[in-house]
Image: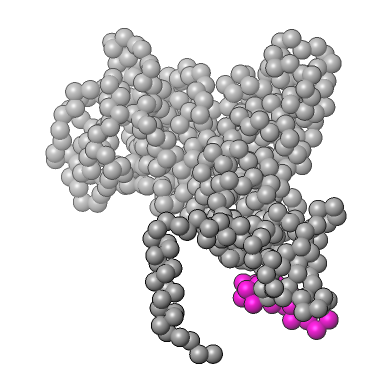
Amino acid sequence: MDVNLESLSRLSLNLLDYLQNNDYEYLSLITDSFPEYYSRKEFDVTLRVGQLPDVEEFYCNSDVLISQSQYFRTALSHDYITKDGNSMILEEPMVTPIAFRILLRFIYKNDVDLNTLDGALVINLIKAAEHFGLNDIRNELQHHIIECNSTWLRNNIVKLINGFFIDDSDELIKTIQNNIIIKISNNPEYLLESNDLGKLKESCFVMILSDDHLFMNQGIAWDILMLWGIRQNQNLKQNVTLWSFGDWSVLKEAVKNVVVHIKFDRISRNDFYARIIPYSKVIPHSLSNHALKHYLDKDVKSRYNDIFRRVFLDDSTLMNHYHADVILKWIDNRQKNIVPIKKRKSIKLKRLFSFKPFSKKPRRKSIKQKQQLPNSRKFNLLCRITSQTKEDPNNFIKNYKENCINRPNTLVLAKVHGSNTIIGGFSPNGLELDYFSFCTPAESSFLFCFNNGELNNDDCIISRMKNGNDVGGSYTSCLWVGPRFGNKDLAIDLNTMKCICQPQFYNSIYADKEFIIDECEIFQINNC
């Protein structure tokens, strides 16, 4: 076919003038109404999508479909395919018309704003993309769920859980399940504050609580369960002190299949008293006895996870058992750095404790340091200081000296102001009070940082004492009271909650040299 170049050139210039005059609304309208506009043209494929009464016909171009999908490449190549004149007919009853309409927009324009879509529709889109083998679209949808903004996820979390938490061996489903688990572990308020919590399916709730990737504080998981149970019956009042025996029976019946999946031996004593006891009437008798034995008998070991057989941690608002287990591995030199929990870098774990339990009175009795600590360790809280702590300076110095000085196997944790980042240090020889001294150097001492409180390999830093450094040869005096490692490699003034990180005898663990902390905890790690 001959083309008149002069006419083509004139047409191009006219089109440019047309666009430059901002008269392109009509073209925009046409493209925005795609595929409705183009479905009126003479395409060679008719897709009847959906099930009665919700069935819709779509008219498409076979070349476009085949270029995007192996599914269509196979389906449209069969000789026995149904035809209506020159048009091939495909029946797709397993896909909803609205999902297919959005998939077509993905195929032709790729400009769908996923943040405007309902969670249930995203689920249908992923399943439809999987059905048609549209891998690029499926991956984009999956990425949206994993990396989406918090507002969209918060509004759709229950719908996503109900849609994806099914017994399915599909790798895509498993990946999405794992990422949702991580999301709610990091942000339990997504469930606690959800207006749709009562619509969460019981089977899905059980799958979440039973999942090995769930690192949510079990006290918070209990709060979510109680709120979920109450919302199963609209007649139950929020104030449990007004409940009758019948009300308690209703709640007990509602949660009976889920409560057995709460891991009571992961709940601190403070949480048990504050959260569990007020609702103890809904706990089965046998389960209640087991939980009480765990708190009354130190020899009762956890039956859920080896970590909880190695780590006894009751009173920390800054770390959980998994942080503690990593620190113990560092102490034992079993691990130079932490192994990532998931291979995907997008999967991250934040610290789980957003509450502040009552401080436990520290034990005054110290133990002798041993060269090799056993497998089971108990973290005894010696001191907790927060930015809201109000105490006479003289009493503060006295208490710090009595509780924290010269205790072997001392662990220090501090939360950086304005973030979830946890920094700290371990000293096998304990802390010193002398203003002009610092922790006695030891090969097994180290500093560490959990960026954003996470246990991801990229966000977890450990720095051991540098080889060949004469720690005793140089120091700067610090006229304050608080833990100090190296010179000012990590120095915390507990009076002002000011922290200094100036690497000299250790490598840097934090970018800022001086900053404020919100809270500091000091533990002694004892043998069990």
At horizontal 45% and vertical 20% (from top left) the residue drawn is 362
Q: Which residue is more in the foreground, 57 or 408?
A: 57
- Residue 151 visible? The answer is yes
The image quadrant of residue 439 is top left
Residue 158: x %, y % from top left: 67, 39
Residue 186: x %, y % from top left: 53, 39
The image quadrant of residue 128 is bottom right
At horizontal 71% and vertical 48% (from top left) the residue drawn is 163
Q: Which residues are magenta?
A: 63-80
Q: Is residue 167 above or below residue 82?
A: above
- Residue 291 visible? The answer is no
* Residue 369 included in the magenta stretch of the image: no
Q: Which residue is more in the foreground, 49 or 419?
A: 49
**For the N terminus, which image quadrant?**
bottom right
* Residue 78 included in the magenta stretch of the image: yes
Q: Which residue is more in the foreground, 89 or 405?
A: 89
Q: Is residue 219 above or below residue 441?
A: above
Residue 373: x %, y % from top left: 46, 40
At horizontal 57% and vertical 21% (from top left) the residue drawn is 270
